Amino acid sequence: MPLSPRACCSLILLFLIATPACGSAGAQSGRASSARSPSARPDYLRGFRVEKTPPVIVRKTFDPRNPPKEMPPLGPRADAVTHFKFGCATSASYETTARRPDRRAGSCTATARINELTARLDLEITIWVPNRARQTLVDHEEGHRVIAERVYETAEKAARAEAAKWVGRSVTGKAANCAAAVDTAVRDANHRFCQGYLEATSGWSGRVGDLYDDITDHGRRRRPTAEEAIELAFEREVESRQTAETNRAGDGNAGR
């Protein structure tokens, strides 16, 4: 049933490729900590704010006969590897609008309305190339960096589109008590926001990167150049996505 007055709270979550890392709900409020000072500004969507840090680029070399333990594994045809990590941290301001305890079941179902959402976005890229690597291989791996950075340029747009699904929306959760039920509801909304954002950024970057590797045979081909291959990979990813959407639409019409 509706509460009077309504309970207002904040929830902070951190995601790195959609992995939650902190806090509980209830009356918690505050700001996620960061070693960098992000640039923050209100965005076009009312109740939504984006804080986006510049990408961090790290370049490392390795001995192919004795690669370091922290290095990601090489693919079956890869001589080098570029690892990118899109980060998504969220803090939500919400109000609890209903609590429905079930004493017989020993549980509670609660509803909360998300009033404001802040997203903190970052990108870390680590490039690993072998000692004395040929220049074409270095250029190829730098191409993966370019792809991730180009996708990251669209991060605010992707986050805003995902936030439009949650700001002003009511969410419901169930748990052993009402406070935990609200916590569950808002955490799930934050989780799903970051999942959607990461699919639109990290997922997109990964698909383009796979096409880029196919086009260049992991940097072994001299033609097309890395720059040309990047453009071609983006174009082919769009074509592939459009084809998939057309096929889904056709399947839906066939089922009517």
Image (cartoon, rainbow, N blue to C red):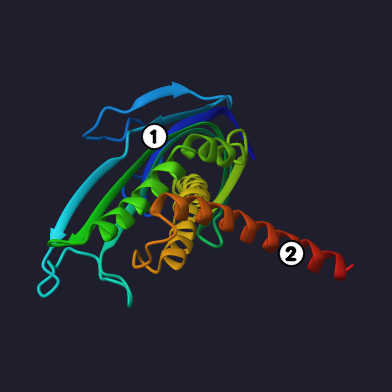
Relative to 196, say whether 157 is above or below.
above
Residue 59, percent from left and from top: 19, 50
> Which residue is label 1 attached to?
27
Q: Mark 2 and mark 1: span between their CA atoms?
A: 44 Å
Residue furthest to the top = 41
Residue 47, percent from left and from top: 54, 26
- First of labels 2, 1 by sequence position: 1
Residue 97 visible? The answer is no
CB-based contact (under 8 Å), mark 2 and mark 1: no
User: Which amino acid type is marked by label 1?
Assistant: Ala
**10 Å neighbourhood of mark 1: few (<14), some, or many (≥20)?**
few
Which image quadrant is residue 72 in? bottom left
Name the residue located 42 percent from the left edge and 61 percent from the top edge: 223
Q: Which mark is residue 35?
A: none
* Quadrant for the C terminus in the image: bottom right
* In this rendering, the label closer to the viewer, 2 or 1: 2
Residue 61 visible? The answer is yes
Name the residue located 35 percent from the left edge and 25 percent from the top edge: 39
Direction from residue 27 to residue 190 in the image, left or right:
right
Tally of numbered tags: 2
Relative to 87, say whether 35 is above or below.
above
> Which residue is label 2 attached to?
248
Which of the pair 204/220 is nearer the observer? 220
User: Which amino acid type is marked by label 2?
Assistant: Arg
Name the residue located 29 percent from the left edge and 46 percent from the top edge: 124
Which image quadrant is residue 127 in? bottom left
Residue 156, percent from left and from top: 49, 34
Relative to 74, say whether 12 is above or below.
above
Which of the pair 28/46 is nearer the observer? 46
* Quadrant for the N terminus in the image: top right
Kind of element beneath mark 1: loop
